Image: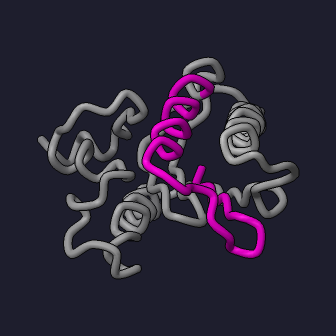
Amino acid sequence: MYVILRGIDRGAIFFADDDYRHFLAKLSEVGTAEAIDVHAYVLMTNHVHLLMTAKSDNGISALMKGLGQRYVQYVNRIYHRTGALFEGRFRPSLVEEDTYLLACQRYIELNPVRAGMVETPADYLWSSYRTNALGAEDPVVSPHPLYVCLER
């Protein structure tokens, strides 16, 4: 499943490095609890892209609900604000074909380059690129079996 989560009116959802770290920690925590494999991600200033596989029918919805609740509570507490942070419900897209899965992963991990934030995807800290492409450790990422087969 490919998921996009945006800030209200495309407003910021991350304000400091600790926010990105907190989001990733909660993604890992809730993902483990809901039996979700996160294959790729990028946390942009005002939106998030995720490529995931759920082991249950309602796993993605449960993950996004739990993640959203925990992260919004954190942001509201840290920044002394109230109310919603995200623009409605997350937008899911089913990924059925192998070629589409690889295209989604590439799209996700190259997002900061296309946005002109970095020269190469390895320069962006808040992405799964360094794990998938360079073998860096990341407790959030479970490389997709199809992607792992490409390495052989």
Q: Position of residue 56 (x, y in %)?
A: 69, 27
Which quarter of the figure is the C terminus placed in? Answer: top left
Q: Residue furthest right?
A: 83
**Measured along the vertical axis of the image, is residue 127 above or below residue 7?**
above
What's the coloring here?
Answer: one colour
**Measured along the vertical axis of the image, is residue 35 above or below residue 146?**
above
Residue at horizontal 24%, vertical 31%?
Answer: 137
Residue at horizontal 52%, vertical 64%?
Answer: 45
Residue at horizontal 53%, vertical 36%?
Answer: 22
Q: Position of residue 108 (x, y in %)?
A: 43, 63
**Measured along the vertical axis of the image, is residue 111 above or below residue 51?**
below
Side (left or right) of 1 relative to 133: right
**Magenta region: which residues?**
1-30
Q: Position of residue 114 (x, y in %)?
A: 36, 80
Q: Nearer the viewer, residue 42 or 77?
A: 77
Q: Nearer the viewer, residue 39 or 56?
A: 39
Q: Position of residue 88 (x, y in %)?
A: 84, 60
Q: How many marks?
A: 0
Q: Nearer the viewer, residue 145 or 127?
A: 127
